[in-house]
Amino acid sequence: MSSKQVLICQYRSCLAQGSAEVLAAFLESSASDVSIVPTECQGQCNLGTTVRILPDEIWYCRVKPTDVDAIAESHLKNAQPVDRLLHPRIHPTYSTP
Ligand code: FES
């Protein structure tokens, strides 16, 4: 099983949207086989906080600290991306199988 990485933007626009708190919430809630990685700008600044999950290449937008449990539980633990938080430009037609 390949372990997942959670990339959480810590650059200007996302920080203004509370990305430091999102990072802290992921550090608290995630399993030990998940890597939590603070990043530079990921180019989606108007929809921060930007969170990207690798190797799945799933992008989440407007993530708030209160959304972290849903991503950790549904996506990281049960491999079900959280539809309501998916980035609409990157995943325009995404639906869960
Ligand atoms: S500042 Fe976060 S995506 Fe650009």
Image (cartoon, rainbow, N blue to C red):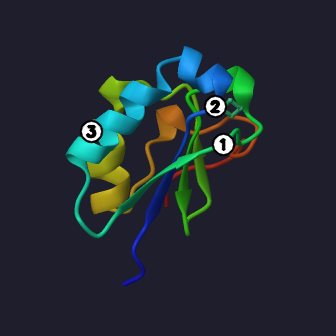
58 relative to 88, above or below? below
Q: Inspect the image, locate mark 1, and give the three-letter code of the amino acid beneath it.
A: Glu
Residue 94 drawn at (x, y percent):
63, 49
Q: Residue at x 26, y 49 (%)?
A: 73
SS at badge 3: helix
Foreground residue among 75 and 26: 26
Residue 88 against residue 37 in the figure, above or below: above
> Which quarter of the figure has residue 32?
bottom left
On screen, residue 35 versus residue 91, left or right, reads left
Write the residue at 77% across / 38% down. Answer: 43
Q: Is mark 2 within 8 Å of ligand 1?
A: yes
* Residue at horizontal 51 percent and vertical 34 percent from the top: 85
The residue at the point 32 percent across, 35 percent down is 24
Instruction: Please name the amino acid that badge 3 sits on.
Output: Asp
Look at the numbered discs 1 and 2 and tell me whether their residues touch, using CB distance below 8 Å: yes
Horizontal and vertical percent for residue 49?
55, 28
In the image, 73: left or right of 90?
left
Identify the image quadrant of residue 10: top right
Name the residue that disc number 3 marks: 69
Residue at label 1? 40
Q: Nearer the viewer, mark 3 or mark 2?
A: 2
Q: Which mark is residue 85?
A: none
Residue that mark 2 sits on: 11
Q: Residue furthest top?
A: 16
Sequence-first disc among 1 and 3? 1
